[in-house]
Amino acid sequence: MTSQVLDTTSKLIAKLQTLAPEQQKQVLDFVEFLAQKYSQPQPPQKRVLVLSIDAVFDAYPVQRMWE
């Protein structure tokens, strides 16, 4: 780590220790949000299209032989 990073970390810890526990929790939540926001992008999840046979027949009505 560089001295600038250590200085920033030390300042952050010093400020954090002066906060009430609830405020410390808010800081933690925010840091976790930032970590997630700037983390490596996840590949998009694959989607599966599911059609029921009823949906197909409703979309494309056919004349049934017995009708």
Image (cartoon, rainbow, N blue to C red):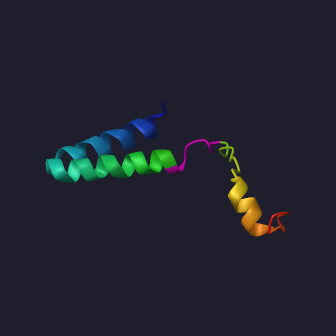
- Residue 25 vertical position relative to residue 57 in the rendered view, above or below: above
Task: Judge left or right: residue 45 versus residue 67.
Answer: left
Q: Please name the residue shown 47% across and 45% down the image.
A: 35
The quadrant of the image that shows the C terminus is: bottom right
Where's residue 59, x and y in %?
A: 76, 68
Using the image as rendered, state which of residue 49 and residue 7 is in the foreground.
Answer: 49
Is the stretch drawn in magenta largely helix, strand or loop? loop
Where's residue 64, x and y in %?
A: 82, 64
Q: Please name the residue shown 81% across and 67% down the image.
A: 60
Numbered disc total: 0
Magenta stretch: includes residue 39: yes
Where's residue 2, x and y in %?
A: 48, 33
Q: Which residues are magenta?
A: 37-42
Q: Please name the residue shown 69% across and 50% down the image.
A: 50
Can the viewer see residue 31?
Answer: yes
Using the image as rendered, state which of residue 58 and residue 43 is in the foreground.
Answer: 58
Magenta stretch: includes residue 59: no
Task: Judge left or right: residue 20 versus residue 15.
Answer: left
Using the image as rendered, state which of residue 52 and residue 48 is in the foreground.
Answer: 52
Where's residue 17, x and y in %?
A: 19, 44
